[in-house]
Image (tube, rainbow, N blue to C red):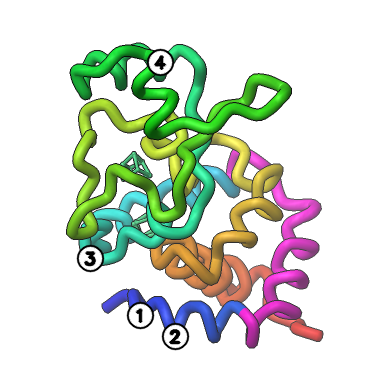
Amino acid sequence: MYQTDLVVIAAASLEKEEENDYFLRSLKNRDTEELDVIVHSIYDKISGGIDCTSCGNCCKSLVINVKQEEIAPLAAHLNLSVDETKEKYIEESQQGNCFINTIPCHFLADNKCTIYEQRFTECRDFPHLHKPGFKARLSGTLMHYGRCPIIYNVIEEVKVRLWFSGNDQPSLP
Ligand code: SF4
Ligand code: SF4
């Protein structure tokens, strides 16, 4: 089964820092589209085997960005005015960037999102492994390797697939 113990994953993240740095560099000459096909197939399998409601660690530990246009639908969903919603839940930077004003997120209860249908683009997209361009985002993905069991398991399986496939034998530092 997949590793979902957050303590184990956080420890592995520290232990594998050098290996992950090597992994990042080893993908430099890989074909972007071929890599995406591999990552997407592994992600589909692993995300289906990990229950996010048993984890919730992204909702507990990340700053959640909110698009300006997502505020009014949230307000309507909560039966509040836009101003009330901003006051209670949203912080806005001087540059006009909005984000949820607490970590963990206000809307997490019992590891479940209480506004699931109205959750933000950032929430829907995390951990971004279904998107094209894995290689270009790998550095950002590895920032969450020690926090997200899906990312951890996908990266570990991609390593196995690429390094032990017979074509690209591992030569770790
Ligand atoms: S809105 Fe929902 S999915 Fe997004 S961070 Fe909050 S609890 Fe998690
Ligand atoms: S996306 Fe990752 S960190 Fe968030 S709940 Fe699912 S497994 Fe946990």
- Report if the CB atoms under discs 3 and 1 are less than 8 Å apart: no
Earlier sequence position, callout 4 versus callout 1: 1
Circle 4 is placed at which residue position? 83
Q: Position of residue 117 (x, y in %)?
A: 21, 29
Main SS, magenta region, reads helix
Q: What quarter of the picture does the C terminus occupy?
A: bottom right
Label 4 or label 3, whichever comes before in sequence order: 3
Q: Mark 2 points at which residue?
A: 8
Q: Which numbered dot is residue 54?
A: 3
- In the image: residue 76, left or right of residue 137: left
Residue type at mark 3 is Ser
The image quadrant of residue 79 is top left
**Helix, strand or loop under label 3:** helix
Q: Which of marks 2 and 4 is nearer the N terminus?
A: 2
Q: Which of marks 4 and 1 is in front?
A: 4
Magenta range is 14-34
The amino acid sitting under disc 4 is Asp
Q: Residue 98, percent across and down?
A: 55, 27
- Mark 2: which secondary structure? helix
Q: Which of marks 2 and 4 is in front?
A: 4
CB contact under 8 Å: marks 3 and 2? no
Q: Is residue 12 magenta?
A: no
Q: Which mark is residue 170?
A: none
Cα distance between the residues tagged 3 and 2: 15 Å
- Relative horizontal placement of residue 96, taking residue 57 as reference (left or right): right
SS of the residue under disc 1: loop
In percent of the image, x 79 and y 52: which residue is there? 29
Q: Are marks 2 and 1 in contact (CB under 8 Å)?
A: yes
Residue 5's disc number: 1
Q: Is residue 32 covered in magenta?
A: yes
Q: In which quarter of the image is ligand 2?
A: bottom left
Per the image, label 4 sits on a secondary structure element best described as helix
